[in-house]
Amino acid sequence: MSKADLELSESELLHLAEMSAMVLTMLGQAMPEDNDARSAAWHKLCVSILKSAAKIPSIRRHMELNPDCGYWFFKRPYVDAAFYSDVLEEFRDSTFWSELVGRLSEQALVENLGDEMATLLTDDERNERVSSYEKALWNEVNHHGLDRLVFLLPPEES
């Protein structure tokens, strides 16, 4: 495979290193036991970028050779204040709310129609009804979060 050279300023290399740290964090959380060759290739590239970044003194002072993972990574105080941590947090937050609203909407549809009737709906009918539930739930969680959502458990589970 041919190689390409890429010239980056220190600031750009720092950004690229942070992006690599974000990817490694996401891979570790989303695919911890993944043996996919694509995942391994991304992991290897990100580790290589972090190693290159650690050669720059102004970046290296924010990094350490992490004994848990065996490669250069940002120190905890830097991670806590880094932009990529904010991006990850926003991603997790938006994914949580999106999944919650989507699953509650699907559940509401099945509870209101019953399993049998819900399976008889066309995709368009199902999407229209679920969309209606989602709009109402988004309005609720945007204004009140989880404060007014109630989860009822059967007596034997409570």
Image (cartoon, rainbow, N blue to C red):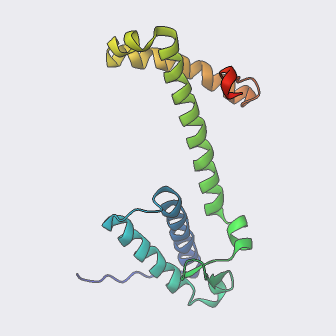
Looking at the rendered image, the quarter that the N terminus falls into is: bottom left
Residue at (32% x, 15% y) in the render: 122
From this viewpoint, is residue 151 visible? no
Residue at (77% x, 28% y) in the render: 147
From this viewpoint, is residue 46 visible? yes
The answer to whether residue 102 is left or right of residue 2 is right
Where's residue 155, x and y in %? 69, 21
Location of residue 15 (image quadrant): bottom right
Residue at (51% x, 67% y) in the render: 24
Depicted 67 relative to depicted 143: above or below: below
Where's residue 156, x and y in %? 67, 24
- Residue extending farthest left: 1
- Residue extending farthest front: 156
The answer to whether residue 142 is left or right of residue 44 is right
Where's residue 81, x and y in %? 72, 65
Location of residue 48 (image quadrant): bottom left
Where's residue 143, x and y in %? 73, 26
Residue at (59% x, 76% y) in the render: 11
